[in-house]
Each structure stands twice: as C-alpha cells, then as structure tokens.
Amino acid sequence: MTETTRLVHLPDEIIDEILSRVPIKSLLRFKCVCRHWFSKISDPNFRHKREIESILQIKSETRTISLHSIDGDKVVTESFVLPSNDRKYECKRTFLSNSCNGLVIICFGKSFFLFNPSTRYLVKVLELNYLRYNCVVMIGLCYDASTKDYKVVIRFTHHSDDVKYVVAASLKTKRWVEINFPFEAASVNAGPMVNGKMHWTVNEKFKNSSLPQEIICFDQHTNLFKEFPSPQSKFRGENAIAGLGVLGECLCMVRRKFHTVEILIMKEYGVKESWTSLSTVTFFSSPFLFIKNGEILGKIKGYQVFAHNPQKNTRRKFDLTGSNDLLHAVSLVQNVFSPVGYEWDEIRHANHGSNVKWLRYG
C-alpha cells in the first residue's frame, strides 16, 4: 500500500482537523486536490482554526484596501483596489462593519459590498439611496441561522436634521425595513459577534461622557435590540466603554477613566455577575482590538499602533504603512467560505435601494 493510498483512507475527522489548521492560501490550493476536499473546504460550516487578527485600512479616495494580518510578532500586509462602476454615487467616506464568520460589509457611497479579506472575495450585495454625504453611518453584520441568511443593520444620522434611523436588510431579499431602536443615544459604536448575537455600545443622551456607557445586543431572529448586562460601575457610577472584543469566545470590554484603562471579561454569557476584571493599566488613548494571545491593540496620537500585554505590562509597536490614514480594526476568524446567492443585480434589484417607504428626501 502506497503512502498516497493510506492518506486517502484517513478518517474524515482527522482530515478535517488537518485542513482547519493549514494557512488560508494553502487551503485554497487544496480545493483542487479532489472533489471530496473541494466539497469539505467549500462547506459553509467549515471553520478554520488559525485565528488571525487583522487591521483593515481603507483609503476612500482611491478605494484602496490594505489588510494587515497579525500573526504573533509578524505583520503581513496585502493591498488591492476595490472595483467600481458606481462613480455617480461614490462618496469620499467609507464605512466598515464588524466581522461575522470572517466576512465584513464595506459601504462606498450608496453601495454595500460583502468582503472576505482572507480570500479577497468581494461582491456587491445592497444599495441604500438615502445615505447623503453628510450622513454618519454605523454598520452591523450578523447571520440568522434560522433562515441561513446574512443581515445588515445600519444606524445613520443626517446632520442637517439630526434625525436618526435604524434599518436592516436581508442579503437574500434586498428589502430594507425600519428597526425600532428604543434608546436615546447620542452615538453608537459597533462591537463583536458573541454567542450568535451582535453587540453595540451606546452613549446615552444627557450623560456627560464622550464614551459609550451601555451595551446593547441585536436579536437577528426578531429584529429587536435589547439591553445587555454591563459590569458594575467602578468610576463614580460611570462605565466609560472604550471598546468591546472577544477573548477565548467570551465578550470582553475595555473601560477607562482619564488615563486609567481596565480590561474585563464576561466569563458566563449574559450573566452580569460574571464580569471579571483582568487588569488595570495606564497606557494608550484609544484601545480598539483584542487579539488572541491576550494583548490589546491601541492607537496613540491617532495613528501609532501598539500592542499591550496586560499580564506582562509590556508593549510593542506595529509599523503599518500609511497608518495615518483611516484605520478600522476587525477581528477575523479566517475561512475560505464564499457565500453564493447574495449578488446584486442592477436590473432585477433596481428599486430595492429605495424601498424604505417611510424615508423620503427631496
């Protein structure tokens, strides 16, 4: 019996374990080995175990995306330009969603693209005609397992009238619907997917803080936002949340008061009493991403990126090309999944970008 023959008869669970640990580029090549491997790797339920955190850096004017992948002490950067035949509606600003199953949503002007940074899979999936140049937009992406469909949730504000809207659309139906948002929020920040739900932080009106104070979560099955248990306040009744993240599949938080930064982890999902403080440090001004070895990425002076290790109280600098441009951090679990059936058809979906009947502008 040859070595090749013995490999063919490896148990499926062993093959799955091996494939889940090889680099993404190798995995893409392995799809050509045989039909069986192609089917395995292309399965939406296939999960890659080499979790690589990435910084997505977008330059709106040139539609250039740089993906800085952080693997231990090494940072690998890849760049490419987004295609566009939509110049009429192009906007100088770009908006980026959280990551869900290794995918993100990128918004240029009125157009929304589904993007897998690991494979460079990119497809236009939605339009929304009401996003004017002076809009402030916050985008969330989540997956509804009951319908096997992705959903985009958007909160946007028009500076001209200070009216805030929350809408959502299924990537399959392309239909926008209004979402009830029962919070008096001055601002909202996107957070991670944990336990199958999307988490945002809210800066409530009439509170004297520039940072969010509360956590909310979105139930994609019911299209409802709900309050989420926050940790007991530590700084004179305030929970100034600088960012949310994920460590070991648990929801994490960075909260701050002046130059004091505290890192907390929710050990039991949804249980307020399970919030546990990991460490308190005085470090960066703007933490924005947890990475798998327990470090936290932060920005100093708006563009210098450092990684802080709270256990060792050490930090290291990341040299990112063009880091003075817009930085948006997304924690990605790499996969080779390229979802089908979500493509935008310019003819068939021509009116879907303006079907939010309650929104009308002259």
Image: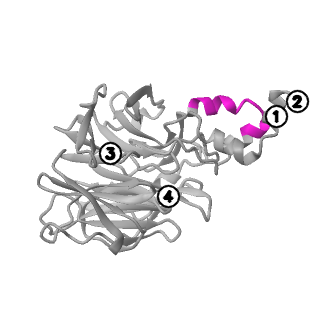
Quadrant showing the N terminus: top right
- Precedes in sequence: disc 4 or disc 2: 2
Residue 40 visible in the displayed image: yes
Instruction: Give the residue at x 50% y 48%.
Output: 126
Q: CA distance from mark 3 to mark 1?
A: 42 Å
Q: Is residue 34 magenta?
A: yes
Residue 90 visible in the displayed image: no
Q: Circle 1: is it few (<14), some (14-19), or many (20+) Cα within 10 Å?
A: few
In the rendered image, residue 87, in percent from the top left (x then y), is placed at: 41, 32
Q: Which residues are magenta?
A: 25-38
Nearer to us: label 4 or label 2: 2
Nearer to us: label 3 or label 1: 1
Q: Quadrant of residue 239?
A: bottom left
Q: Is residue 53 magenta?
A: no
- Looking at the rendered structure, the secondary structure element under dot 3 is loop
Q: Is residue 235 left or right of residue 227?
A: left
Q: What mark, if any, has residue 169 been given in the picture?
A: 4
Q: Is residue 257 left or right of residue 119?
A: left
Q: CA distance from mark 3 to mark 4?
A: 35 Å
Query: Disc 1 residue type?
Result: Arg
Query: Disc 2 residue type?
Result: Met
Instruction: Give the residue at mark 2.
Output: 1
- Precedes in sequence: disc 3 or disc 4: 4
In this rendering, the answer to whether 135 lies above or below 237 is above
In the rendered image, residue 60, in percent from the top left (x then y), is placed at: 34, 33
Q: What mark, if any, has residue 6 been given in the picture?
A: 1
- Looking at the rendered structure, the secondary structure element under dot 1 is helix
Query: Disc 4 residue type?
Result: Ala
- Precedes in sequence: disc 3 or disc 1: 1
Instruction: Give the residue at mark 3.
Output: 295
